[in-house]
């Protein structure tokens, strides 16, 4: 592949973009409608835009519970899947996602530490864990990059993956220690380590949207460079890609966006791994298509996973991280088995 071919690669077709947008909107409406209380579509419309007093209960459920929650699920799914696709392309490893850097684990550790130490902000109960999650996400990235820099000034992808895996194991051990001494705060720590979208607000949805715009758009703009990385770093250098700068930019943006997601909904696994991997098998490795498709499919997947989390055992609610891990693990095993058998090349 040469520089000219990279420029001529087609992105996501307008028709496909319209189709995926429609699928996202349809999933959004279905997830708002269904749950422990099923609400007809007509009643959703009247609850949001009408003034019928008889539908006041529906208004409360739709406007203040489900709409912000489903919005957060869609935005977080898009962000995590986009980060996973970018990291898989950058590291040339189909098993990689944004959490390969250890950022998700670091963010969860920060939130757990905040809960155990009782760090909070007046009037904002969840602001302390959220702020600590974002701070530890950036701190984890800086630590991993510093270690990678000390080993190899070129930031070898193999070294970054290895350091990320070791760092994740270290953080898991520290989390276990915190859980041991958490006492009555165990439930709150479990929320951050397993993930939950219960009780989300429009303000948190706005935070996710801002993070997706600020850190997600640069990832989309790096599609040509990621196509070059997918072949080899030598190829990227040959066609004039500033390898070190692009690698750092992608890692910083992906890590920051993951930190934003963890600060809102806790650690949610497998979204950034399984969705881009499936799409790469289905539509090919061209990141001009893969990155936007990953955002669309990630939004759909996490909205449906959240629907399953709050509906399967109603009135009990499963942590959404458990649902995504179960679906992701089973799906990935099936894909791996079929690929080994020759069903997918």
Image: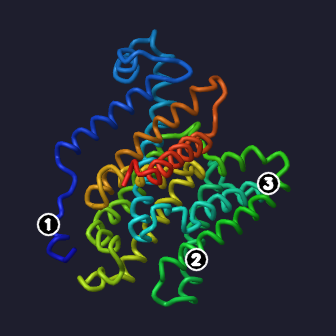
Image quarter hosting the N terminus: bottom left
Residue 146 at x, y percent in the picture? 57, 83
**Mark 3 = which residue?**
179
| Identity of the residue drawn at 37% across and 45% down | 297
| Identity of the residue drawn at 14% across and 74% down | 4
| Identity of the residue drawn at 72% across and 46% down | 188
- Label 1 vs label 2: CA separation? 36 Å
- Label 1 vs label 3: CA separation? 53 Å
Residue 27 at x, y percent in the picture? 38, 32
Identity of the residue furthest to the top in this view: 54
- Label 2 vs label 3: CA separation? 24 Å
Circle 3 packing at 10 Å, graded few (<14), some (14-19), many (20+), is some
Task: Please give left or right for residue 112 compared with residue 296 in the image.
Answer: right
| Identity of the residue drawn at 41% across and 15% down | 40
Residue 143, image quadrant: bottom right
**Mark 1 = which residue?**
8
Secondary element under disc 1, as helix, strand or loop, is: helix
**Nearer to us: label 1 or label 3:** 1
């Amino acid at each position: 592949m040469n520089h000219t071919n990279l420029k001529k690669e087609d992105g996501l077709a307008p028709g496909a973009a319209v189709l995926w947008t429609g699928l996202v909107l349809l999933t959004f409406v279905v997830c708002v409608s269904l749950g422990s209380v099923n609400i007809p579509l007509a009643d959703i419309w009247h609850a949001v835009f009408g003034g019928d007093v008889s539908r006041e209960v529906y208004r409360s459920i739709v406007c203040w519970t489900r709409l912000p929650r489903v919005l957060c699920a869609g935005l977080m799914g898009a962000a995590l899947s986009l980060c996973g696709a970018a990291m898989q392309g950058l590291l040339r490893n189909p098993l990689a996602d944004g959490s390969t850097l250890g950022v998700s684990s670091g963010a969860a550790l920060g939130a757990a530490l905040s809960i155990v130490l009782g760090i909070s902000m007046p009037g904002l109960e969840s602001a302390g864990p959220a702020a600590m999650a974002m701070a530890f996400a950036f701190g984890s990235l800086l630590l991993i990059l510093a270690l990678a820099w000390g080993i190899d000034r070129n930031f070898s992808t193999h070294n970054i993956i290895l350091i990320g895996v070791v760092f994740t194991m270290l953080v898991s051990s520290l989390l276990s220690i915190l859980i041991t001494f958490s006492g009555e705060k165990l439930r709150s720590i479990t929320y951050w380590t397993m993930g939950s979208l219960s009780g989300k607000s429009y303000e948190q949805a706005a935070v996710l949207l801002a993070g997706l715009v600020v850190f997600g758009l640069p990832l989309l703009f790096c599609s040509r460079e990621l196509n070059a990385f997918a072949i080899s770093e030598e190829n990227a250098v040959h066609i004039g890609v500033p390898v070190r700068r692009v690698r750092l930019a992608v890692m910083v943006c992906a890590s920051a966006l993951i930190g934003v997601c963890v600060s809102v909904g806790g650690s949610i696994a497998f979204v950034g791994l399984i969705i881009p991997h499936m799409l790469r098998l289905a539509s090919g490795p061209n990141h001009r298509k893969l990155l936007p498709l990953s955002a669309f499919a990630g939004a759909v997947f996490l909205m449906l996973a959240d629907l399953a989390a709050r509906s399967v055992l109603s009135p009990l609610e499963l942590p959404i991280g458990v649902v995504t891990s179960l679906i992701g693990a089973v799906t990935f095993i099936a894909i791996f088995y079929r690929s080994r058998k020759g069903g997918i090349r």
